[in-house]
Image (cartoon, rainbow, N blue to C red):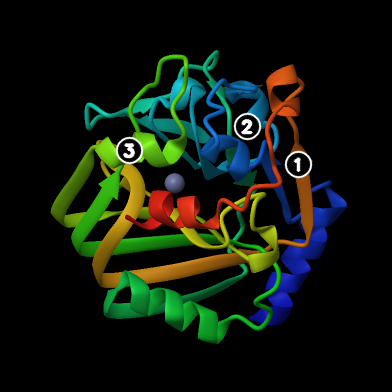
Amino acid sequence: MKKIILLIVICLQQFGFSQQLTQVSTIDALLSGHYDGVISITKLLEYGSFGIGTFDKLDGEMIVYDGVVYQFKSDGKLYSAEAENTSPFASVVNFISIQSWSFTNINLAEIETKIDSLITNLNIPYAVKISGKYSYVKTRTVPSQEKPYKILAEVTKTQPVFEWSDQTGNLVGFRLPDYMKGINVPGYHLHFISEDKTKGGHLLECKFDRAVVEIMPVYEFKMILPENSEFGKIDFSKDRSYELKKVEKE
Ligand code: ZN
């Protein structure tokens, strides 16, 4: 089985496919309140058909799934993003399943621990896809902001939170190594999208009845940095790890 996957990857590489993660801006820029979009949705899709992020003015959570960009807004509805919309922060890959495992009756913390014990190299990025049947899912989204922008830790104090039972859907995201601190989110960062494409959001908690985890290791990393002068004024010397933890997990 491993040989077949390796052969498929080599063939895809011949046609210009690479296991590359492309990221727009940095998580610390987002944490410090830089919500103006810097890349169009159309351009973002040139770099990958699978991933996560947010939108211009922080208008909802982004889920890039099967080449479609979805927007889960604070009204609790999932939309197909407008092509002319833009993103201030996003991470995408062209996902192919390199390794997969199945689990039953497991929660989010347990499945993350399981994956950590099964992957051989914890110091490279992984794209993570989990197809599941869930007894419980809890997500949040972020509401559209007006200038002057508040920092993200202030915005998320009043974030809309959503809870559902008996769902079928996918988790889309990444497990990133600790050295990406400041650039992206170390550890797991997953967004939910329901099978019927009506629900989504930044995952806070879930319980799986069944889960199929698929991962793709990433060996190439590309950053697209904002060309605006605002980015040049951000103080990146500040350690925002505490803010990130508040924003991502609560
Ligand atoms: Zn998120």
Please rate how many residues cluster around mark 2, counting C-alpha atoms within 10 Å: few if below 14, some from 14 to 19, many from 20: some
Q: Outermost residue, bottom direction?
A: 117
Q: Residue at x 38, y 30 (%)?
A: 60
Q: Residue at x 60, y 80 (%)?
A: 119
Q: Nearer the viewer, mark 3 or mark 2?
A: 3
Which element type, helix, strand or loop, lies under badge 1? Answer: strand
Report the residue marked by disc 1. 223
Inter-mark Cα distance, 1 to 3: 25 Å
Residue 49 percent across, percent down from the top left: 59, 41
Q: Which amino acid does the dot numbered 2 rest on?
A: Leu
Report the residue marked by disc 2. 45
Please rate how many residues cluster around mark 3, counting C-alpha atoms within 10 Å: few if below 14, some from 14 to 19, many from 20: many
Which element type, helix, strand or loop, lies under badge 2? Answer: helix
Residue 32, numbered label: none
Report the residue marked by disc 3. 141
In this view, 51 is above or below 103: above
Q: Which amino acid does the dot numbered 1 rest on?
A: Met
Which element type, helix, strand or loop, lies under badge 3? Answer: loop
In this view, 231 is above or below 91: above
